[in-house]
Amino acid sequence: MGGRYPANVRWTERLDAGEVFNCGMNGLTIPAEGKVWKNLIESRNPDLVTIMLGSNDLLEGRSADEAAARMESLLKTLLDSSKSFLLIAPPPMKPGTWVPSESLIRESGRLCRLYRDLADKLGIDFADAGEWNVELSFDGVHFTEAGHETFAEGLKNHLKEKYSES
């Protein structure tokens, strides 16, 4: 009801995939300028960078096309850091207290297709969290406690499939 779940409930703590640097924060939109993120990536030196943004952009009135264009600009800034990237499309929104219109739900569904095309264009990995049946809360956007668990399982499976040593 407006707060964050304890750390042990959130998906970032459920991955069992080594150290996870969670740079997410409430209300974060796709940054128009990626220099701060680039510096953060270079200072942390992660093996994989995952990015799942865009829902807040839609909630602030941007279209899926505008959000995807911002994401492309951000990724182009970050890609020369020679890291592996995984672009994750957020689960489509559902009706809720933050999602009053069908058009917002449609735009959130379009974001997935645009991100898939963007990942193909940039030659990076892509995952569709909408395929993982993540339960969303009463607001229509954020994960429930069970949704965090489901998301973590979906991401673990994706990482195992794509990044496990054969």
Image (cartoon, rainbow, N blue to C red):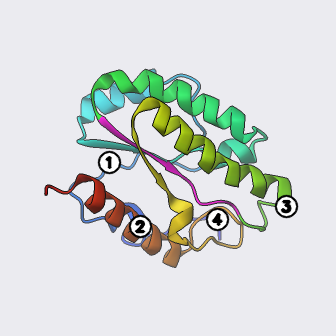
Point 78% across, 67% down: residue: 95
Magenta stretch prevailing secondary structure: strand
In 3D space, how far apart are the residues under numbered discs 1 and 3 (Cα atoms)? 33 Å
Which residue type does callout 2 highlight? Gly
Which x, y percent locates residue 73? 54, 24
Tag 3–tag 4 contact (CB < 8 Å): no
Quarter of the image containing the N terminus? bottom right
SS at mark 2? helix
Q: Mark 1 points at which residue?
A: 21
Q: Name the residue under label 2.
A: 154
Kindly report which numbered mark, 1 or 3, lies closer to the viewer in this rendering: 3
Disc sitting over residue 2 in the figure: 4
Whether residue 4 is visible here, answered yes or no, is no
Mark 3 or 2 closer to N-term? 3
Q: Residue lying furthest bottom in this view?
A: 146
Which residue type does callout 4 highlight? Gly
Kindly report which numbered mark, 4 or 2, lies closer to the viewer in this rendering: 2
In 3D space, how far apart are the residues under numbered discs 2 and 1 (Cα atoms)? 18 Å
Whether residue 97 is visible here, answered yes or no, is yes
SS at mark 4? loop
Mark 4 or 1 closer to N-term? 4
In 3D space, how far apart are the residues under numbered discs 3 and 4 (Cα atoms)? 18 Å
- Magenta span covers which residues? 84-93
Kindly report which numbered mark, 3 or 4, lies closer to the viewer in this rendering: 3
Horizontal side, residue 100 vs residue 68: left or right = right
Tag 4–tag 1 contact (CB < 8 Å): no
Point 57% across, 50% down: residue: 26
Nearest the viewer among 148 and 164 is 164
Point 40% across, 33% down: residue: 123
Mark 2 or 1 closer to N-term? 1
